[in-house]
Image (cartoon, helix red, strand yellow):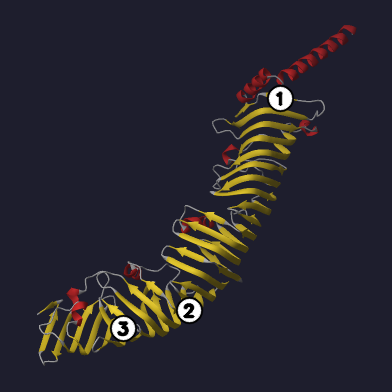
């Protein structure tokens, strides 16, 4: 018996010596390398560390140096200078669930393909780490990250676990290409729902603060978001810049405040923007609101050739559509203002008032092409109940037929300017007049026009102008059918007989001043030449009583 007792004692001593040898060996580079190889060979992970440090002053902590960890065949999930593992009595029943894990001075890749990880902790702590989120659709890259996740129980497809409280700060980060500094995030994960109670960051020389929630279906609810003094330049077009708002199933905005922001892209810019938006939901390429409001003002807004100065917009959003309470802006040297409603039923824009004053506007070179292009689906029709114009200068620089009208005034009532997504004059009445005009290098004074339109025709009941020595008066009818059949009756008294030559009529056999009578018809279609459709008769008499009559058929004098 004494021999057996001594044997057991010697076995225990030997075992203790082996344990001590193993303990000290692990704290050497050779021992750490051997343990790394053994763990990598006997698991689905690649694990390396250079040394293990354990101090009896902190017996429950193990410190690993220069750690690399990842799944076989995948990029490393973790690269860290120090990994401090805090142990507890729980390791007796659950060896892979530790008390704390502190990752310091390294990089952590939060890729769903890297989960599930084989261990968990009551708390995961980060100190001066870099975070990346490949394969998540968020394109997150953050540096100098500190904070924690408690508890930390990673699962397949969910690196942070299904239920945890998170609190992290980052010295700098980039989210979907948008850089920020001094970022702070605090919130909770509960199943598929993520609640961010605090979000803050310095970005684009300004600041962002707010709170939000992501639901289990991927939709977002932004209760409050505030952007101050943002100065952002982007290499994306405006549509591409706004595209991330449409990538989530639904985005509900409770309140969005933007103060003194300046944004710029390759073909767009806005400066000194103040915006307040409330109660708006974006989903399925559209929007919904029950009691929404939007108000904005800016120093300048540029989109392509559109350049607005000091625009102001106030509108109310409802299930029925948008009530435009106010829109005013300086534009092309003048002022525009409007109010009305966009109605969801029928996608109709109905303006109670539209006024343009003091414009100096040169039509774009492709304005005829733009006029024929269909409007977007959300704008089926445009109606202006009351239209006003005052002291405007309008210029067309088309070299084939340049023209301009000076001091253009006018008014209109119930003008339907778009129908079935196509611009036109589909209804209503209007009267226009100017101080002077030039049409293909022919100067006239006091040009005036009155028209009314219905579903069948546009009837020009008055079209007149004074020439250098006489007056021209005309009436015309333009069909609303696709062929756009047009008939014109023109009378000139005491006018130069060659005046119509500048407007396309062949030269007359007589000259001087006199009277002319013209009746003509044609088909005015954007995709077909005009000249072959022109038929008409011109009779002219000069002061010497010389007369000439010309017949035109198919654009040629017979």
Task: Please indicate whether residue 257 sits to the left or right of residue 86 in the image.
Answer: left
The front one of 417 and 343 is 417
Instruction: Please tell me whether residue 134 is drawn above or below residue 525 in the rendered image.
Output: above
Instruction: Please tell me whether residue 528 is drawn above or below residue 488 in the rendered image.
Output: above
Task: Please indicate whether residue 224 sits to the left or right of residue 490 in the image.
Answer: right
Which is nearer the N-term, disc 1 or disc 3?
1
- The residue sitting at 14% across, 90% down in the picture is 541
Q: Is residue 290 visible?
A: no
Instruction: Please tell me whether residue 44 is drawn above or below residue 471 in the rendered image.
Output: above
The front one of 22 and 350 is 350
The alpha-carbon separation of the residues under discs 1 and 2 comes to 75 Å
Residue of label 1: 52
The alpha-carbon separation of the residues under discs 1 and 3 comes to 91 Å
Badge 2: residue crowd in 10 Å (few <14, some 14–19, many ≥20): many
Which is nearer the N-term, disc 1 or disc 2?
1
Q: Position of residue 456 (x, y in %)?
A: 32, 83
* Marks 2 and 3 close (CB-CB < 8 Å): no
The alpha-carbon separation of the residues under discs 2 and 3 comes to 23 Å
Residue of label 2: 351
Can you tell which quarter of the image residue 359 is in?
bottom left
Residue of label 3: 457
Badge 1: residue crowd in 10 Å (few <14, some 14–19, many ≥20): many
Q: Is residue 487 visible?
A: yes
Foreground disc of the pair 2, 3: 2
- The residue sitting at 47% across, 76% down in the picture is 336
* Image quarter in which the C terminus is found: bottom left
* Callout 3 secondary element: strand
* Marks 1 and 2 close (CB-CB < 8 Å): no
Badge 3: residue crowd in 10 Å (few <14, some 14–19, many ≥20): some
């Amino acid at each position: 018996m004494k021999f057996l007792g001594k044997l057991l004692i010697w076995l225990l001593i030997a075992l203790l010596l082996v344990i001590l040898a193993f303990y000290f060996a692990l704290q050497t580079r050779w021992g750490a390398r051997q343990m790394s190889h053994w763990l990598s060979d006997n698991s689905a992970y690649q694990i390396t560390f250079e040394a293990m440090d354990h101090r009896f002053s902190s017996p429950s902590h193990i410190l690993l140096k220069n750690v690399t960890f990842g799944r076989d065949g995948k990029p490393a999930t973790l690269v860290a200078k120090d990994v401090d593992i805090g142990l507890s009595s729980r390791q007796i029943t659950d060896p892979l669930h530790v008390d704390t894990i502190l990752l310091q001075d390294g990089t952590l890749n939060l890729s769903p393909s890297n989960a599930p990880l084989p261990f968990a902790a009551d708390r995961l702590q980060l100190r001066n780490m870099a975070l990346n989120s490949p394969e998540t659709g968020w394109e997150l890259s953050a540096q100098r990250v500190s904070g924690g996740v408690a508890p930390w129980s990673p699962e397949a497809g969910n690196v942070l676990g299904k239920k945890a409280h998170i609190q992290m700060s980052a010295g700098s980060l980039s989210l979907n290409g948008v850089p920020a500094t001094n970022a702070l995030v605090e919130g909770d994960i509960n199943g598929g729902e993520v609640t961010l109670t605090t979000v803050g960051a310095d970005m684009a020389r300004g600041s962002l603060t707010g709170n939000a929630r992501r639901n289990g279906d991927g939709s977002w609810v932004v209760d409050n978001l505030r952007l101050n003094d943002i100065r952002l330049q982007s290499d994306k077009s405006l549509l591409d810049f706004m595209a991330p708002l449409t990538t989530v199933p639904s985005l509900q905005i409770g309140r969005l405040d933007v103060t003194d922001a300046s944004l710029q892209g390759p073909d767009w810019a806005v400066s000194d923007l103040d915006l307040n938006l409330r109660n708006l939901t974006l989903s399925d390429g559209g929007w919904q609101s029950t009691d929404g409001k939007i108000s904005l003002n800016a120093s300048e807004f540029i989109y392509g050739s559109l350049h607005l100065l000091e625009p102001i917009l106030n509108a109310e959003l409802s299930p029925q559509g948008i009530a435009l309470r106010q829109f005013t802006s300086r534009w092309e040297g003048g002022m525009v203002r409007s109010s009305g409603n966009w109605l969801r039923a029928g996608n109709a824009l109905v303006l109670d008032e539209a006024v343009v004053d003091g414009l100096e506007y040169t039509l774009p070179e492709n304005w005829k092409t733009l006029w024929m292009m269909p409007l977007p689906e959300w704008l089926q029709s445009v109606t202006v109940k009351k239209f006003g114009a005052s002291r405007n200068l309008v210029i067309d620089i088309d070299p084939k037929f340049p023209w301009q009208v000076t001091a253009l005034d006018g008014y209109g009532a119930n003008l339907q300017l778009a129908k079935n997504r196509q611009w036109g004059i589909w209804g209503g009445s209007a009267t226009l007049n100017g101080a002077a005009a030039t049409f293909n290098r022919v100067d006239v004074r006091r040009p005036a026009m009155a028209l009314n339109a219905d579903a069948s025709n546009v009837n020009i009941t008055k079209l007149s102008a004074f020439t250098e020595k006489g007056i021209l008066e005309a009436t015309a009818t333009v069909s609303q059918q696709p062929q756009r059949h047009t008939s014109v009756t023109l009378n000139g008294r005491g006018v130069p007989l060659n005046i119509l030559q500048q407007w396309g009529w062949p030269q007359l056999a007589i000259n001087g001043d006199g009277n002319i009578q013209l009746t003509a018809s044609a088909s005015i279609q954007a995709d077909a030449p005009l000249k072959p459709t022109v038929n008409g008769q011109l009779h002219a008499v000069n002061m010497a009583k010389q007369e000439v009559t010309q017949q035109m058929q198919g654009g040629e004098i017979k």
